[in-house]
Image (cartoon, helix red, strand yellow):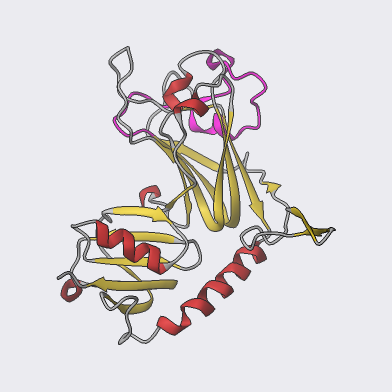
Amino acid sequence: MLIFLFGILVSFCPLSCQCLNLTQLDHSSMQASQVSDYDGNSAGRAIDGRYSDTRLASGQCAHTGVDSHPWWKVDLGTDHCLGRITLVNRGDSSTDRLTGAVVRAGIESDIFSNAACGVPVTSDQASIRGGHTQIVCDPPVIARYVSVDDDEHVYHQDNHNNVLILCEVIVEEYPMEACSQMTTIGMSTASIKVDPSLSITGMSTLMFVGKHITTSRPLSVVHIKSPMQCFMRCKINNGCWSFDYVMTSGQCRLYDVKAGDLTAEDQPGCLVYAVVRG
């Protein structure tokens, strides 16, 4: 970012980008999967690098079958520091099917345990034929898995549930040290909270450091910038009694498990809190 300060042009870079350039990741040889295939349009077609022709008939797009919650996923093989994911929409018809699509990135193979990057695709973005919708991960996230899912349950004129059509998923990364720097900064900020006798606001207590809550499925998973914001999410959710927050990725997971029932497993950089409700 360039600004004028006392008549001098000054270069300023937000902390989250560390003044580093994004590099497109070559994931064409990686393993992609999706909930189901429609008419042979397999998941790998969304990472083949071929999206000059985004008509479905061109054979360059991934297409799921009809499903109430369609999803697509790629395994990048190793952890990367991801900054941006771009979804390339189909270029012929029914582009609106991408409305509400959510991009997730993280270290969990279960995509619904990973945090969302940015916000869901809007109807305006989805209306563009062959459109490139950029989803920014801010702050950058350490991830091995990138996924797209749609839980909007939108019924279209043909009375079908959602399908997911992706003509390409472009993944861009920062050097890993960018995420490492942010982790160092985040952990130094959180270090004052590592005494289990302390609480964020007097209404939550830090139970475990370097662990995550073990339960079948969280109430919700969001991607935010601090344990305090995660706590506020929990407080406005009447069913939430505990949460864990991953410092390396900003992943905030809410649970309906009370303090006395909490169990946790090792996960570096993760903090587990119990919430007190009056």
Image coordinates of residue 271 in percent, x first then y, are 38, 73
- Left or right: 144 with respect to 206? right
Q: Which residues are magenta?
A: 42-70
Q: Main secondary structure of the magenta part?
A: loop
The image position of residue 124, as x and y in percent, is 49, 26
Rendered-image quadrant of the C terminus: bottom left
Q: Position of residue 22 (x, y in %)?
A: 69, 50
Indicate whether 233 appears above or below 158.
below
- The answer to whether 254 is drawn above or below residue 62 in the figure is below
Q: Residue at x 65, y 63 (%)?
A: 178
Instruction: Depth check: give the residue in front, 18 or 39.
Output: 18
Residue at 84% across / 58% down in the picture?
Answer: 7
Q: Is residue 226 above or below residue 37?
A: below
Q: Quadrant of residue 270?
A: bottom left
Q: Is residue 55 found inside the magenta-colored segment of the image?
A: yes
Taking the image as shown, residue 160 lies to the left or right of residue 129, namely: left
In the displayed structure, does residue 7 sit left or right of residue 38? right
**Residue under the image location 33 percent in, 24 percent down:** 66
Q: Residue at x 63, y 39 (%)?
A: 28
* Residue 58 is a magenta residue: yes
Q: Viewed as shown, does residue 223 lie left or right of 76? A: left
